[in-house]
């Protein structure tokens, strides 16, 4: 069975990717299976740069097909911030709660109609003779209080377009069908099927 490394230490992200790609006849490994590997410093100026850097470095170290993604929340009223620094919006080594608190502070007093936002995910797949990226976008709005206990990151504040529940309230099977990551990884799924001739 072919093997692919999912280049992440984020357990929430890992769970989502495995749910989206789980039907493939592939053995998915993660960085938890390779504790000796150095941490990839995400210092790119774009989501694309970070995704490619992660997949490229892990592929070079393991010589195994590697899949990585970088995801950002882009809030239109904030000039598409936090964007590439979404995971460290409130500083280095901060919690999801810290980031959510900062986002709520930045949007304090802004009416719901002006809280348009989108999650954007860029996924990078690198293997012998292939290096490619794909993108997924999910549009929605930011609410003014945390709702729901599922998901991770900014999920309790984001209501996807066409729904009245946050990502943290929606059942995972719905989120994993409509989300930015779902869109990107469905495209990756097609690439993997073609690459391994499955």
Image (tube, grey):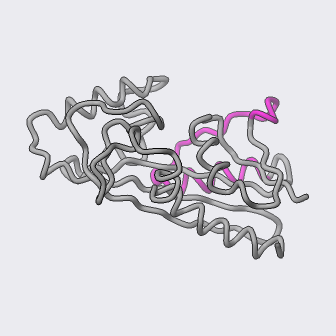
Q: Position of residue 113 (x, y in %)?
A: 12, 52
Magenta segment range?
32-59
Q: Quadrant of the N terminus?
A: bottom right
Q: Residue at x 14, y 46 (%)?
A: 112
- Is 48 in the magenta? yes
- Is 173 in the magenta? no
Q: Quadrant of the C terminus?
A: bottom right
**Vertical position of residue 11 compared to residue 177: above or below:** above
Q: Position of residue 25 (x, y in %)?
A: 82, 60
For residue 181, side relative to residue 31 (left or right)? left
Q: Nearer the viewer, residue 102 or 180?
A: 180
**Vertical position of residue 124 compared to residue 167: above or below:** below
For residue 187, side relative to residue 171 (left or right)? right
Q: Position of residue 47 (x, y in %)?
A: 49, 53
For residue 38, side relative to residue 157 (left or right)? right
Snapshot quadrant of residue 167: top left
Q: Residue at x 68, y 57 (%)?
A: 21
Q: How many marks?
A: 0
Snapshot quadrant of residue 100: top left
Q: Residue at x 62, y 50 (%)?
A: 17
Q: Position of residue 14 (x, y in %)?
A: 64, 42
Q: Residue at x 32, y 45 (%)?
A: 165
């Amino acid at each position: 069975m072919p093997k692919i490394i999912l280049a992440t230490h984020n357990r929430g992200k890992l769970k989502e990717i495995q749910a989206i790609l789980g039907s493939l006849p592939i053995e998915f490994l993660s960085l938890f299976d390779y504790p000796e590997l150095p941490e990839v410093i995400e210092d790119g100026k774009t989501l694309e740069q970070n995704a490619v850097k992660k997949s490229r470095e892990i592929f070079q170290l393991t010589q195994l097909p590697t899949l990585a993604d970088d995801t950002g929340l882009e809030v239109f009223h904030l000039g598409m911030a936090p964007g590439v620094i979404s995971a460290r919006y409130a500083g280095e080594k901060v919690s999801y709660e810290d980031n959510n608190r900062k986002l709520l502070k930045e949007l304090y007093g802004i009416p719901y109609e002006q809280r348009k936002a989108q999650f954007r995910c860029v996924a990078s797949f690198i293997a012998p003779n292939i290096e490619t990226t794909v993108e997924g976008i999910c549009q929605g709005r930011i609410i003014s209080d945390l709702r729901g206990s599922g998901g991770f990151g900014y999920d309790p504040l984001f209501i996807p377009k066409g729904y009245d529940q946050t990502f943290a309230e929606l059942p995972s099977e719905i989120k994993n069908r409509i989300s930015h990551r779902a869109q990107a990884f469905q495209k990756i799924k097609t690439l993997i099927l073609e690459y391994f001739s499955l």
